[in-house]
Image (cartoon, helix red, strand yellow):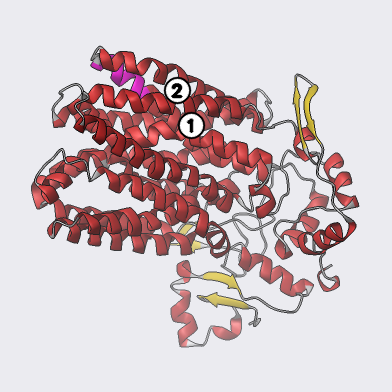
Amino acid sequence: MPDHLTLLGTVGHPAAQTDRRSRWLSRWQCFAYQRINNHPKAPTRQKLKLQELAQFGIGYLTQKPSLFQLPGLYFKMFGLTLSRWYLFIAAFAVQFCLGCIYAWSVLNHPIDLAVYGDAKKGRAVNTFYISMGVCGTATAALGPIIERKGPRWAVSIGTTLFMIGHIVTALGVHYKSIAWIYIGYGVITAIGMGMCYISPVSTLQKWFPDYRGTAAGFAVAGSGAGSVVWSKVYLPTIDAVGLAWMFVLLGTIMCTVMYASVLVLRVPPPDFTVNGLNIHGDRIDESDVLEEKLSTAYKPVQTPTGADQKETLVSSKTPTQPLALKHAVLSPDYIFMYIMFFANQLFGVIVLSRLSGMCTDIFAKSANTASDIVSINSVFNCCGRLAFSSISDFLVRYFKVEKTFARKVLYYFTLGAQIIVIGSLPTVIRHESFTFFVIEIFVLTCSYGGGLGTIPALVTDMFGAYNVGPLHGIILTSLAFGAVVGGITFNNTYNGKVADGMSVGEAYIDNIQVIFVIVCIGFVVLFLVRTNIEDRFEPGYHYSLCGKRVISIPPKEKNAEHREHEAETTAPKLPETAV
């Protein structure tokens, strides 16, 4: 066995068949996993092939042909041959369990009552804001290592943290400690959620370059569907076993489902193609396959520099920009996408945590009615995530719309709809029109879900598939920032105004007007996200409108020493032994 390749499982080598340990391990090959140990020496061609297979986690070497038409690769578990469509189910199942966070508003009053003896204390809602903040931060901080280790490692560790957090939360409820609840659910469970959230999404982006939007939407739609179910399950479970044991019981059920999904999740090999598309979504020729396999196995992402950069950008026929992670994060398009996504998610992440309370406090509805509204609202959240991303695929496949522009058009709709609805929401609240309020909340939630479901496909289309995990994780920090800063500020401002004698409705309206301004800014910034291939690939910042360049900012001049250092550090070439 090569010393640079560690196989946690079994290898189908004839000499190993007589060994009892090998025979025992072969029965559990569904748990096999490969990873690469770093080597100071450059790999040879033969070792490079093994390293390539290990890096992308196929991990099952036998003599039989593969379902993916890759020689020497085959995987069967419980009599079923692995299909990429099984990953749809596994990713949906993981996201379904994570959807419990969006049903948290149902738990606000029970937790406040259990800890403080006052259902309207308004402290439990901070758990949601903390968890969203920690979850987003975890996705950004752990994104690179998740991309290296693979989805099974991420979901396994994340699920374990998810369960530990539920147990700590149950102890916090039992001992009436809001701090334990903040730490258990707001921190530990949230870190597990962050690890489990981006991993299935980025995995599907690699397996489904032909249905990228649908894959992203279907994955994150699972959390929307989960919030529908969990919002209806929480209260009956509390009545049956109590609030503390509810966290233990439901947490165990969710973790069992997520652990089972680990058996299916994996990433494709680097030369995986489907319908003529590689994992980046680019059409390739057969003559390009060997070159693609060698380059991606040794260095996943390379940044052209120097004299080669201009030639590469001009001759490129693909809308995927091959930037290294740090360059992608600092690119103007990514920064504008970050601001746009923050504006698109801000109202949703705040309202979802307070919807139940708004129904009872502003419109004097019962807790059961509020729970029903939360459940129906979760359906719109789920439908928005799936519908908007699928529509973008429909535009690409049947109307031949450029894929990045198709995703961008949908954000025009989501942000535009939010501007109209948020602008009219104060009038609806003042007139206490519950019917119009519910309709507007459903529209807003659908737009919120649509933005959340489309962003993985947009990030992948803009910057390629290799760094989709880290880039998706970093952009989700805008969601975390909105939850922590926006949510807690909203909550404290609201509580302060109510304490000063302002009505509940007016206290909400004052905060909503601030969000309205931020959403308008996001709509304007969206125009600056470039989808024109020539504008994006040319150095500097250039923006064309209707075929005419309206903005042209040249790149900063770099001295010769800086250019030489950049060429050495950002664009290493393949060693001779690997060519």
Three-letter amino acid code of the residue under disc 2:
Gln
Disc 1 designates what residue? 344
Farthest residue to the front: give it.
500
Quadrant assignment, res 223: top left
Question: Can residue 111 be seen in this snapshot?
Answer: yes
Depicted 246 relative to depicted 226: above or below: below
| Residue 472 coordinates in the image, percent (x, y) | 54, 47
Q: Is residue 529 above or below residue 208?
A: above
* Magenta extent: 434-442
Q: Is residue 199 above or below residue 299?
A: above
On whether residue 311 falls in the magenta region, the answer is no
Q: Earlier in the sequence, mark 1 or mark 2?
A: 1
Q: Is residue 437 magenta?
A: yes
In which image quadrant can residue 514 be found? top left
Q: Position of residue 366 (x, y in %)?
A: 13, 27
Residue 358 lies left or right of residue 347; in this view the side is left
The residue depicted at 15 percent of the width and 31 percent of the height is 368
Q: Amino acid at mark 1?
A: Asn
What is the quadrant of the C terminus in the image? bottom right
Mark 2, residues whose alpha carbon is within 10 Å: few (<14), some, or many (≥20)?
many
Crowd rating for badge 1 (residues with CA inside 10 Å; few <14, some 14–19, many 20+): many
Disc sitting over residue 418 in the figure: 2
Residue 35 image position (x, y, % from top left): 58, 71
Marks 1/2 in contact by CB < 8 Å: the verdict is yes
Q: Secondary structure at mark 2?
A: helix
Percent x, y of residue 53: 64, 66
| Horizontal relation, residue 465 to residue 163: left or right | right
Q: Is residue 376 left or right of residue 203?
A: left
Q: Residue at x 48, y 75 (%)?
A: 26
